[in-house]
Image (tube, rainbow, N blue to C red):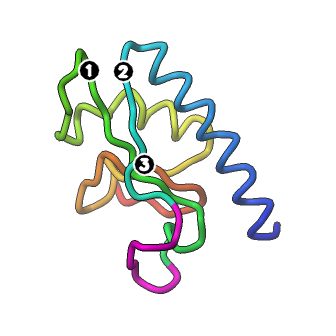
Amino acid sequence: MSLRNQQSEFTKALGLLIIYAYSLGYELTLGDTYPGKFKHIKGSFHEKGLAIDLNLFKDGEYLKNWKDYLPLGIYWERLGGSWGGYFKNRDGCHFSWGERTYY
């Protein structure tokens, strides 16, 4: 599958994740999204356009703990994505497409 097709699948799944988050009463803002002003390790999923960091809010409060993202992480992985909350160095706000997770 081409990178462009993977990016399209990622974007479609991301739309579903965003709708799901709002249905649970969360609000989101976009964090680190697509290559540009952010510097990443060459070949990273952010650089490929296959990862995003989301900022999570509940009742106006910014949630920073990776566990706060757990309902979204579970849903994201059911869609076929990889969630940073399961990485060795937990990164709850990280959602990617096709990246290996470490349990």
Asked whether disc 1 touches disc 2, contact meaning CB atoms under 8 Å apart, the reply is yes
Label 1 vs 2, first from the N-terminus: 2
Mark 1 neighbour class, 10 Å CA radius: few under 14, some 14 to 19, many 20 or more: some
Is 87 drawn above or below residue 25 in the view shown?
below
Q: Secondary structure at mark 2?
A: strand
Alpha carbon separation for disc pair 1 and 2: 5 Å
Is 79 part of what is drawn in magenta?
no
Q: Position of residue 35 (x, y in %)?
A: 52, 71
Quarter of the image for the N terminus: give it. Answer: bottom right
The residue segment tinted magenta is 34-43
Residue with the mark numbered 3: 83
Q: Quadrant of residue 6 in the image?
A: bottom right
Q: Nearer the viewer, mark 1 or mark 3?
A: 1
Alpha carbon separation for disc pair 1 and 3: 20 Å
Label 1 vs 3, first from the N-terminus: 1
Which residue lies at the image location 47% right of the left edge and 54% below the top edge? 52
Is 82 drawn above or below residue 26 in the view shown?
below
Residue with the mark numbered 2: 26
Which residue lies at the image location 52% right of the left edge and 38% below the top edge? 76
Residue with the mark numbered 1: 58
Mark 3 neighbour class, 10 Å CA radius: few under 14, some 14 to 19, many 20 or more: many
Q: Secondary structure at mark 1?
A: strand
Is 79 drawn above or below residue 100 in the view shown?
above
Q: Amino acid at mark 3?
A: Trp
- Look at the magenta stretch and give its main secondary structure: loop
User: Does 37 sit left or right of 62 as displayed?
Assistant: right
Which residue lies at the image location 46% right of the left edge and 50% below the top edge? 95
